[in-house]
Amino acid sequence: MTGRFVTFEGIDGAGKSSHVEALARWLRERGHTVVLTREPGGTPLAERVRELFLHDEMDALTEALLVFAARRDHLRQRIEPSLAQGHTVLCDRFTDATFAYQGAGRGFDWTVLQQLERLVQGTRTPDLTLWFDVEPIEAATRRAAARAPDRLEREDEAFFKRVRDGYARRCAEHPARFVRIDARGSLQTVWSQVEHEVTRRGWW
């Protein structure tokens, strides 16, 4: 029995990480085995790549190659084995983030990213992608109140507007698996949207 693969996307400060953990609790309370993971990261090798990615200066191509290399290890070592065992995998960011940040944000070639996606993932795509959408200025305010910024979080508002546009483009390209979550409200208001979307699919 193959498990379900759900990814959480959005610009930094959209609030998605809180809801990854909330959905994990919700599913575990209902008796499901949940693997909670993230990108870049999820395996010892990929976590080391994450540190380089978030803190060392590099160009857009290097960023893309690093995240896809980490993703390959993540898929082979954690995601695919977990799905094969019938577990639910919840992942904080996946390939849509690469298109949004490196493709739209950095202006890197969308077609090259599609080629890397096919090479690294084969036919594996998420069953559901929850896109937490919020205005970049609101996201920036949330980030400033929450933590010291990493290399990408220090980018300006124009960058995050392009990233948001990148997510919108991916949503338009993959409407069957994408769901836009209005992330402007309270935690409970946003969670109600998440709960509705996962419940109506009847998977769990």
Image: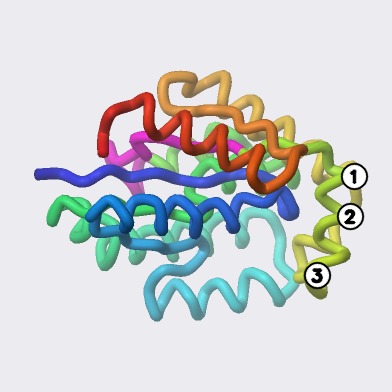
Q: Secondary structure at mark 2?
A: helix
Residue depicted at 32% across the width and 61% down the height: 35
Mark 2 and mark 3 in contact? Answer it, CB < 8 Å.
no
Specify start and end residues of the magenta stretch as a single range. Answer: 118-131
Q: Whole-Å distance between the Cαs marked 3 and 1?
A: 15 Å
Give the Cα distance between marks 2 and 1.
Answer: 6 Å
Q: Which residue is denoted by mark 3 in the rendering? A: 149
Residue at the spot x=48%, y=50% of the render? 94
- Mark 3 and mark 1 in contact? Answer it, CB < 8 Å: no
127 to 53, vertically: above or below: above
Image coloring type: rainbow
* Residue 137 disc label: 1
Vertical placement of residue 34 versus 120, above or below: below
Identify the residue at the far left of this view: 1
Dot 2 corresponds to which residue? 141
Disc 2 residue type (three-letter): Thr
- Residue 49 colored in magenta in the image: no
Seen from the viewer's position, the closer of residues 129 and 64 is 129
Residue 37 location, x and y as percent? Answer: 42, 63
Q: Mark 1 or mark 3, which is nearer the start of the sequence?
A: 1
Q: Where does the C terminus fall, quadrant-wise? A: top left
Do tag 2 and tag 1 residues touch (Cβ < 8 Å)? yes
Q: Amino acid at mark 3?
A: Pro
Residue 85 located left or right of residue 30: left
How crowded pointer 1 is (Cα within 10 Å; few <14, some 14-19, many 20+) is rated as some
Q: Position of residue 93 (x, y in %)?
A: 53, 52
